[in-house]
C-alpha cells in the first residue's frame, strides 16, 4: 500500500462572518506575515501604477500596506463577510485611502460585477477557506489582463495533526484561545503544494507554487 504522506483535509466554514471571529482576527498581530505579503506583491507588480484585485481582503490590512508602499496603485478589495468589510471600511478610512481602495462585498468565486481589467491579482489566506477552489482560479484567469501579476499566499497543510498542533503552539503563543483554534482549523483545511499545482493545471494557469515558510505556500507568476 502507498505510504500516506499527509493528513486528510478538513474544510472549515468559508466566509468569516461571525463578528467575534472577525474581531479576534482583526485584533491579532499578523504584522510580519502581512508586511512580507505586501512586499511580495509590490515586488511582483513591476510597474509604478495599475489596478490590483485583492480576494478575501478581511480587514484590508494588506491593501493598505501596498497603497502606502506604492502610491500609484489602486486596489479593489473583495470579501464576502459583512463583519470583515465593516472593519475594513473603518481601517481604510483611518488610513485616508477611500479614493484608492474600493471595498466590495462579493463571492471571490463569482465576481460577475467585475470585468477583465486588473494588472495584478493577489490574495492572502483565502484559498484554504474554499470548499471547491476551481471557480476561484477561473475568476483569477478571467479578471487579470494578459501579463498580469498573480500572487496567492496561503497556509499549507502539515503532514500530521501533531505537526499542526506544534505549529499552532509556535505561531499563536500568547494569542486568545479562539485565534489558536482558528489557526489550527485553518492548517487542517489548507491545501498542500501538490494539490495547488493540480488545481492550477486543471485551471490552465501557469503559476509556480513554492513552500515559503514552515506553514505557507505561494503560487505566483504572470498570466
Ligand atoms: C483568513 S481571512 C484573510 C484576510 C486577509 N486576506 C488577511 O490576510 O488579513 C480570509 C477572508 O476571506 C474571506 N472569504 C472567505 N470565503 C470567501 C469568498 N468565497 N469570497 C470572498 N471572501 C471570502 C473571509 O470572510 C475572510 O475575511
Image (cartoon, grey):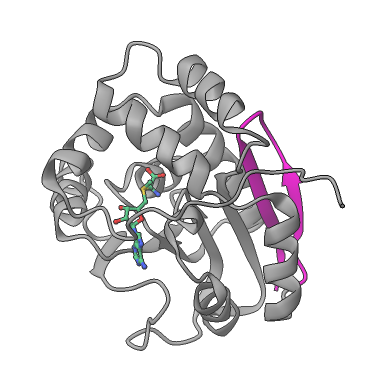
Residue 206 percent across, percent down from the top left: 77, 70
Q: Quadrant of ligand 1?
A: bottom left
User: What residue is rendered at 42% in x and 76% in y?
Assistant: 109
210 on left or right of 45? right
Q: Residue at x 44, y 43 (%)?
A: 186
Residue 169 coordinates in the image, percent (x, y): 47, 16
Quadrant hosting residue 145: bottom right
Toward which corner of the image does residue 45 lie, by quadrant?
A: bottom right
Closer-to-camera residue (169/205) = 169
Which region of the structure is painted magenta? Answer: 206-223
Residue at 30% in and 27% down: 28
In front of the other: 49 or 11:
11
Please tell me which residue is depicted at 31% across the width and 48% down the height of the picture. 60
Task: Report the number of discs.
Answer: 0
Residue 174 vertical placement versus 211 (above, below): above
Q: Is 94 in the magenta?
A: no
Quadrant the C terminus occupies: bottom right
Q: Main secondary structure of the magenta part?
A: strand
Q: Residue furthest top?
A: 174
- Taking the image as shown, residue 80 lies to the left or right of residue 167, namely left
Quarter of the image for residue 100 reads: bottom left
Image side of residue 181 versus residue 92, left or right = right
Residue 196 in percent (x, y) is at: 68, 60
> Relative to 28, is 196 on the left or the right?
right
Inspect the magenta stretch and tell me whether residue 215 lies in it: yes
When the figure is inspected, residue 55 is found, relative to residue 86, above or below; the finding is below
* Closer to the camera in the image, 206 or 174: 174
In the rendered image, the residue lying farthest to the right is 1
Which residue reaches farthest front?
1
- Return the x and y of residue 68 as percentages of the image width and height: 40, 41
Amino acid at each position: 500500500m502507498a505510504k500516506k504522506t499527509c493528513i486528510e483535509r478538513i474544510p472549515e466554514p468559508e466566509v468569516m462572518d461571525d463578528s467575534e471571529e472577525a474581531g479576534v482576527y482583526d485584533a491579532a498581530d499578523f504584522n510580519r506575515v502581512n508586511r512580507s505579503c505586501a512586499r511580495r506583491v509590490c515586488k511582483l507588480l513591476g510597474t509604478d501604477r495599475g489596478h490590483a484585485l485583492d480576494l478575501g481582503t478581511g480587514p484590508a490590512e494588506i491593501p493598505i500596506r501596498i497603497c502606502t508602499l506604492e502610491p500609484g496603485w489602486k486596489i479593489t478589495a473583495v470579501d464576502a463577510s459583512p463583519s470583515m468589510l465593516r472593519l475594513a471600511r473603518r481601517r481604510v478610512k483611518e488610513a485616508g485611502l477611500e479614493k484608492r481602495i474600493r471595498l466590495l462585498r462579493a463571492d471571490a468565486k463569482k465576481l460577475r460585477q467585475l470585468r477583465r481589467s486588473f494588472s495584478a491579482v493577489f490574495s492572502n489566506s483565502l484559498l484554504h477557506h474554499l470548499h471547491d477552489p476551481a471557480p476561484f482560479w477561473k475568476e483569477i484567469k478571467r479578471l487579470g489582463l494578459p501579463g498580469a501579476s498573480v500572487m496567492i499566499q496561503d497556509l499549507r497543510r502539515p503532514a500530521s495533526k501533531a505537526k499542526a498542533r506544534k505549529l499552532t503552539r509556535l505561531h499563536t503563543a500568547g494569542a486568545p484561545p479562539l485565534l489558536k483554534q482558528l489557526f489550527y482549523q485553518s492548517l487542517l483545511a489548507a491545501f498542500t503544494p501538490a494539490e495547488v499545482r493540480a488545481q492550477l493545471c486543471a485551471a490552465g494557469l501557469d503559476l509556480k507554487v513554492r513552500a515559503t515558510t514552515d506553514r505557507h505556500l505561494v503560487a505566483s507568476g504572470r498570466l
